[in-house]
Amino acid sequence: MKNITTNLKGLLAGVVAMVGLSGPVWAQDIDFFTIGTGGTAYTYYPVGGVIANAISRPPGSRECDAGGSCGVEGLIATAVSSRGSVDNVNAIASGLRNSGFAQSDVAYWAYTGTGTMEGQEPSTNLRSIAALFEEHVHLVALADSGINSISDLRGRRVSLDEPGSGTYVDAQLILEANGMSVDDITPETLKGGAASEALRNGKIDAFFIVAGYPTGALVELASATEIMMVPIDGAGADALTEKYGFFSQSIIPDGTYENVVAAPTVAVGAQWFTSSVEDEELIYNITRALWNENTRTLLDVSHAKGPSINLDTALSGLAIPLHPGAERFYREVGILNN
């Protein structure tokens, strides 16, 4: 055991030397904290990376006011690629991950055991940390595909994303709201770059993505070939938003993607969740680090969706109770009063 400890200290000392830290790392407490995100080509993963970096403060880091990390003392947070919202809430509920991003609708259904999660054990240990940004449903097709509405998907090869993702759930709800089902299409379950590549190569006719715009996979796709955003509007969008309060009608603006005109669509909220078993003091400090001024700077410059992540909207659309640590922070700063 003594030799193992000595070797570990030597290894940690080497890590410290490589990253420019100082001090006896092995004498300090280290906490690891995972954030489940999504596919690497989507919005969750890069935003998760920014937040993980912002809330981390490994032992030996320089002080915040000396240009160092302003995260949580001794915390090393990691953004973990995953299959998306459903995968993340299940992983939190089972204890596999400390936290994760999820669509507001998926998280609520998991928490209550209703909607698309009906018949499953409610994940009553889910707790909210913050609302982050709005996510838009993108229905992507080639510009010359002849697909101009949801009804034009009949008989076509359409990727719904992977099971375990929020996109997979929402794509089916959108079909249902328009009087269709998976049986009316030839469904595929491709994610991110794979779906884009399949569209370019003619292996599928359209695919769904639920993500904050602009999302990297589509930026790259639009620069390589002519695509369009298929409108999600009309009676189908009305029926969807009336039945499910988590959806709102919105628009993907003109020019968001190269040579792609504006398209009406529906949107949900992207939110950050954790478990009720996580330590109150830890989540309090994580929430405080999330809204630190230095984090604000990182969010503003690191990703196009970053500027829309604001303390003023941190509680917008939350339908799951706050974690006590997060609740304490929001009460302290005065945006939660009752």
Image (cartoon, rainbow, N blue to C red):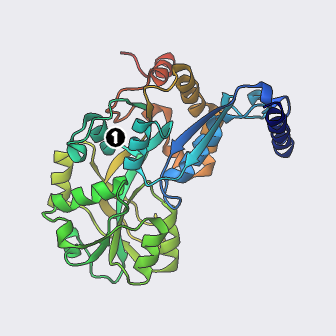
Quarter of the image containing the N terminus?
top right
Residue at (60% x, 38% y) in the render:
296
Residue at (30% x, 44% y) in the render:
105
- Residue 60 or 163: which is nearer the viewer? 163
Image quarter of residue 3: top right
Mark 1 Cα-neighbour bin, 10 Å: few <14, some 14–19, many ≥20? many
| Residue lying at the far left of the rendered structure | 179
Image location of residue 176, percent across then percent down: 17, 59
Left or right of 287 in this view: 183: left
Residue at (60% x, 45% y) in the render:
50
Quarter of the image containing the C terminus?
top left
Image location of residue 24, percent across then percent down: 84, 28
Circle 1: element type: helix
Which amino acid is tagged 1? Ala
Query: Is residue 297 in view?
Result: no
Query: Is residue 231 in view?
Result: yes
Left or right of 276 in this view: 66: right
Image location of residue 136, percent across then percent down: 37, 55
Count up the numbered dots: 1
Left or right of 301 in this view: 271: left
Image location of residue 304, percent across then percent down: 54, 53
Left or right of 16 in this view: 104: left
Q: Is residue 184 above or below residue 24?
A: below
- Residue 258 or 86: which is nearer the viewer? 86
Residue at (47% x, 22% y) in the render:
330
**Which residue bears the numbered disc 1?**
107
Q: Is residue 253 above or below residue 91?
A: below
Q: Is residue 323 above or below residue 145?
A: above
Image quarter of residue 108: top left
